[in-house]
Image: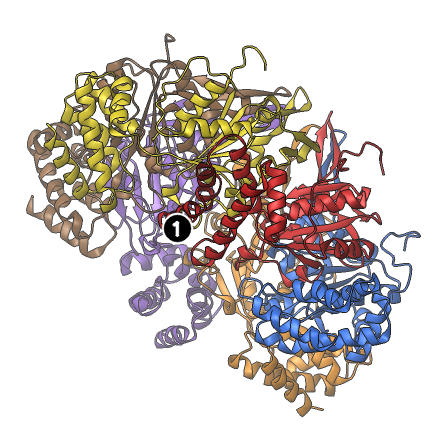
Chain colours: A blue, B red, C yellow, D brown, E purple, F orange
């Protein structure tokens, strides 16, 4: 490992263990099995992978996937420098070489060629084929592929193929238990335990009405935002409106319901 | 902050506070929370962000989003200069480096890779990943991400994903109250209070029939246009026809209704 | 203003005022308000803007919009010249710099990024953002944005968004009154007043059956074509068939109806 | 006119006048009016425009339009030559400069930007705007725009817009009268009058059943092909099968009907 | 003709005449008429055109068409060589220059611009327009255009336009008669007459159930494959399963039917 | 064969023969017939081709196909090196030259031009046409084309055309028999025979409920993953949940069913 590797995480990220995800991730890493993190928006998947990278002392290279992410964005490309074409590694190739954790966030959003590129890296071959250089790269023993995936978005067009899914050990994430979530909101949002607890109670109610029109519940992140606003002197009601009600929906009727839920907690 | 920064707003923009949006924006800026401005066309979202940039004394970099705006348009790209490829920062990268407010106007219109690029900038990481340079840029402490969004346009194809929405504190805008709007129209349109008030009364009536066929009500901007025309000697009726009736609709029957509304005010 | 500016219109175009469009355009130009010209094909919108450019003594830069017109076609791009990339202004940038009237003909046909590019030019900011150069250009005081738009073509896919529409003062055009149209046809088509009048009578009848199958009535331009053919010795019936009946429709039954209308005038 | 212009037609093409299309084309050319040739496949539209180019002694530049024909294919583009970008005129620009007839064959097949490019060339402006060079080219007085168009193909997606149609004088073509068609088939196919007449009789019968399943009748070209095969010693039945029956349809039942029609003429 | 032309076919391909296709092709070649070969997969169309090229002693240039084949792939393009752009002929241009047979295999699969490019080569003009070079190339007298086309694939999207079809003399191909097919399978597959005959009997039965679910019958090529496997010591049943049953279908029920048909012949 | 060929497989891959696939592949290779491997995800197709390459002592070049794989990715392209364009062979061309097995994994995922490129390589011609170089390459006698294909994915858009299918001998793969699969899981997963046997029993039950909602059964690979986790000290239930239940489905009800199946085996 290079000293001063910019991909190393220097200080321990705040992470509260909510199940057996830590030993399971360690077992997968020890057995060199690729890992899939399943769960809703803002429940801590990205934080978890940062925490595990710190804990395992491995560099972490994160790629946020999107519809215009091509395989060459991951692998690398030739650039023109001083009248010469020079090869520049992409983030995946860098991770494969240095033995980093490569984290493909929201992998279903990427173009299909991306998912195929990772196939030979996620079975017993553990190789990356750089077609443009005619090079086949064997992964560093510490290389670990991690992807995240939100099953709530599943649609016909944006689904992981079975031939991709069946290459990963899957860990499921969900919102933390109320007690733990209150601790997280208080710590990260910088507010007192009571206000944090009220925010978590509100979130619980919002997540319950989720099936009645809200496509997704309030994330822990939004609770922390609300806490941050309260910390800046904003009232509880105004903070909840700006950080929870308005971001979650544009629907007038659901907004009214949410507004009533907030009023109940004043 | 650079002296003579071209992105600084030198003179105070005219802005009338219509709710608690100013303290809320200040709280979000202090807590470094990304901000989403929700509201209809021409109700003052862009003016508000200019006003806040002036008030907070931060540079403002605005990007009007559209279907062909790629992530690389925001981040930057390599250009060929004197036989060498030279990196040129895009507007988002510039804002991240200098600690500016980056305002993505009508963000749902942009390509999907754009919204993903801003994800790591809008959670606690506050980083911008410039994949093509292999550089990860930590945002300047004063950097603030602001997006605007018109819920009235919402469709299946053009909607903000929950994983994007739940990264923003949201402020809702609407047309100003009649009294305030009259002041704005008189000030900006350069006409007397009475004519301004008649225009605002007309706008109120038009906004009421909105549900009966008009997809959107008359914006404050169009009222100022009508005022400008009156200031140039055009009659009230002709000004309203050219600046309100014709821009709003091509439908003969709605035009008749609008024409009657104008006649009622002569 | 540059002497010998190639965009200046040297001789007065023939234009017959049919309403209050001239003073209204002058008022909008004086107040620096963007102008939208609404109306059917071939009724004189392009001629009108040429006439106003001549009258206001401003250069006119016209861009015919189409599905493959990108924002960069309007703004400009880098070209390679003698081993160097040189920036070349597009027509919109040229107009913004020199204070010309920029006329975007059939603007709904353009790509969506085009309409967004003109947004900051069509509100009180009056700026053009040249992202590729990192330059923000303030419009010359004489710069005027004019667009044309045919409401008859309106479809779900090809419609102006409200956020674009509500940036323009709109002038409506239609076919001229019979007396004026006869004068235009006689002058431009080089024929006697009687034949011109018969052509205009025919056009009136064709425009009446428009709702019964013809998507659009006969334009003044086609009447002038018919007049030109008569001027070349073609018979009235043959000229009307070649210049009116055949261009307007491929439908056998409507052709028969039009043929009968022509016969009625022999 | 350049001597040895490769676009000049040296020898008179064989063309049989079937109506008043020759004087009408001459009138349009004299009045500088754009011309649209309407009619089915293989009825002589291309031959007619070659004949008129020869008769008017003007060069002819033909462009076969297709879905991937961009405006730049017509206008021209910059090419890299010896480290320099050199402008190369496209066929339309060449025609505009030299005063040629520019014939856009099957214009509805072209991309939409193509049809828009020809707009300023087909009204009284007669200019071609070469945006990439910032050049506005006035058409040579002899320049004439001619397009062809097959109404039988008309569909929602592939239709000429009224704003394009209403810029042309239209001449309608159809299959020649039997007597004339027999003369054409005998002359071009190199066979005796009797066999030619039998082929034309067959074509008449095929064109009659057209509405019952054949999307288009047998073209004069296919009759000439059949005549050519007979001239090479192929039997009448085999020639008609190979040159008429098989090219026209893949449908078993219609093939049987056509086979019976051929047998009737043996 | 160049000596050592790599496109010449040196040794006579094995071809069994099954109708009058040889004299018909010779007549078309003599009369310079383009030829369309119609028929199902693997029935010998490609072999036939190789045979005719050998027989007529003309070079053969074959292009397998596909959805991403552009006109420029056929015509040629500029390439950068030693700092200079050099024109490189595509296969069609090469054929037009040297008087080769140009065989476009499965032409409906190609992009539409491809079919249009061949139009001026397939009527009496016999020219190829190389727009990028501003060159119009007259075809060598021996140039012959041949296309293949499988009517069984016909769909709305992938159909030959009448304006393309009506430019070709069409020859229809089908599976050979049992006796001839047995000879072919024995000769090409290197097995005894009896086994070849059993394979052909099986193919006949498979082709009969074609309408009941199989989209296409077993090709002669697959019969030769089965014969090859038998020649390598594979049993008749295993060879038929691997070379006929499995390639033809994935449907369990049809596979069972085919399996029964194989068993009947053991 | 080059010494030190990086495409040679040095050590024998672990492979358990489950039918007659080895002699059949050897017969096809001897007769130079292209081979198609049909079967579900993770049942050993890739391992089999690696084993056969080792056994036949031929190099193996694997290409994972995807929606953005163009023909030029397979064949090669010109790259700019030191101011010169240099041709670089793609993986298919390399295989054709050196006589390797070219394995196109999941070939239906590739772009259509890819499947057409391999046509002349998969019939008796055995040639690769490199259009961009004007080169026609005859395949090395040892060259062997192998493709894989999962019939379970078959859809209208992603299907192999008959004209492609009928060029291959097809071998069908399925999950191994329980006894063999237990041996594989124990060997590869590094666990005792009893646990391996329980995992295989579980897989059998999961594959049986496949038709009731699971699109594909549990692959052998996932069983090995579960075994690996158990080997790392994870409990049987947790390992099955992470390596089988979660990767296979996001459906709550099917997850419950799977959970019950796991509990039955504790």
Q: Position of residue A260 (x, y in %)?
A: 65, 74
Q: Is residue A119 visible?
A: no
Give the secondary structure at mark 1: helix
In the picture, measured across the screen, residue F127 lies left or right of residue C128, that is left
Outermost residue toward the right in this view: A3
Pointer 1 local density, CA inside 10 Å: few below 14, some 14–19, many at least 20: some
Q: In the picture shown, does residue F253 fall above or below E88? A: below
Q: In the picture shown, does residue C55 fall above or below C253? A: above
Q: Position of residue D231 (x, y in %)?
A: 16, 32
In the picture, measured across the screen, residue A243 lies left or right of residue E105, that is right
Q: Position of residue B161 (x, y in %)?
A: 62, 60
Q: Quadrant of the C terminus of chain E?
A: bottom left
Q: Position of residue A54 (x, y in %)?
A: 87, 64
Q: In the picture shown, does residue E161 fall above or below A218? A: above
Q: Quadrant of the N terminus of chain E?
A: top left
The residue labelled by disc 1 is B257
Q: Is residue B166 visible?
A: yes
Residue sitting at x 86%, y 61%: A58
D218 or A53, nearer to the observer = A53
């Amino acid at each position: 490992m290079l000293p001063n590797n910019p991909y190393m995480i220097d200080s321990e990220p705040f992470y509260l263990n909510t199940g057996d995800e830590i030993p399971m991730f360690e077992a997968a890493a020890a057995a060199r099995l690729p890992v899939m993190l399943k769960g809703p928006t803002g429940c801590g998947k990205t934080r978890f992978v940062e925490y595990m990278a710190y804990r395992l002392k491995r560099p972490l290279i994160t790629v946020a996937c999107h519809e215009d992410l091509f395989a060459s964005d991951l692998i690398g490309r030739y650039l023109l420098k001083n009248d010469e074409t020079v090869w520049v590694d992409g983030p995946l190739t860098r991770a494969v070489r240095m033995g980093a954790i490569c984290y493909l966030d929201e992998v279903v959003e990427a173009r299909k060629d991306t998912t195929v590129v990772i196939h030979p890296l996620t079975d017993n071959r553990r190789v990356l084929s750089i077609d443009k250089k005619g090079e086949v790269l064997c992964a560093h023993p510490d290389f670990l592929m991690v992807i995240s995936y939100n099953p709530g978005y599943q649609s016909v067009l944006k689904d992981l193929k079975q031939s991709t899914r069946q290459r990963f050990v899957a860990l499921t994430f969900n919102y933390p238990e109320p007690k733990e979530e209150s601790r997280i909101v208080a710590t990260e949002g910088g507010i007192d335990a009571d206000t944090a607890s009220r925010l978590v109670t509100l979130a619980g109610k919002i997540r319950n009405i989720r099936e009645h029109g809200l496509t997704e519940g309030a994330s822990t992140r939004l609770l922390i935002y609300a806490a941050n606003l309260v910390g800046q002197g904003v009232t509880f009601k105004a903070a909840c409106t700006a950080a929870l009600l308005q971001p979650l929906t544009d629907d007038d009727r659901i907004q009214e319901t949410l507004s009533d839920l907030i009023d109940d907690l004043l």
